[in-house]
Image (cartoon, rainbow, N blue to C red):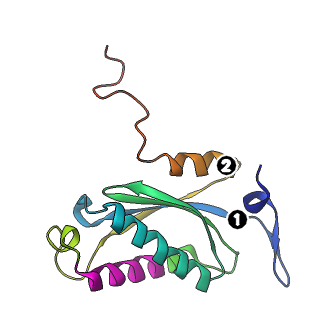
Amino acid sequence: MSADTDDFRNGRHVVYRLHAHVVLITKYRRGVITDRVREQLIATTREVCARHNVTLVEADGETDHLHLLLDYPPRISLSTLVGAIKTNTSRVLREKHWPEVTSALWGQHFWSPSYCVLSTGGAPSQTIRDYIANQRTPNRPPGRPGRA
């Protein structure tokens, strides 16, 4: 276990170790997350997290979704944090007017209104970090599972 993600944190009246795995999906599941879009999404997410005293432990994804592993204090509402991340990342990307985004998505939205939050429960955070870090690495041969 790595010390930076598995140690307890403390506040004035609380000791905690909370991690959440968040998955954000692009509007209409459009594949608009290129390398530069992904880098911008992660950088903006890191800034939003810093403002809320949240640590972005790991982030990566594919062309239509982004995985985030967050280390957060108990005073933070995950729905509020996710809303802030989605609002700020969308605004920053829209201001850039990158063609890969503007050609596939219209209006002011970048993200689907839906999202997924998973408690990391008892899973070692390194296992989840590895899963997120390897999002773009194929884990099986192409084709249907179980077929030779």
Task: Reply above or below: 51 against 133.
Answer: below
- The magenta span reads 83-97
Please state the horizontal and vertical placement of residue 126, each as a whole percent of the image: 67, 49
2 and 1 marks in contact (CB < 8 Å): no
Q: Is residue 83 left or right of residue 36?
A: right
Tell me which corner region of the image, top left, top right, bottom left or bottom right, holds residue 58: bottom right
Q: Which mark is residue 126?
A: 2
Q: Residue 18, labelled with which disc?
A: 1
Residue 110 can be seen, yes or no? yes
Residue at the spot 63% in from the left edge and 79% down from the top edge: 76
Secondary element at tag 1: loop
Residue 80 located left or right of residue 138:
right
- Magenta stretch contains residue 78: no
Using the rendered view, name the quadrant where residue 52 is placed: bottom right
Q: CA distance from mark 2 to mark 1?
A: 14 Å
Any part of residue 82 in sight:
no
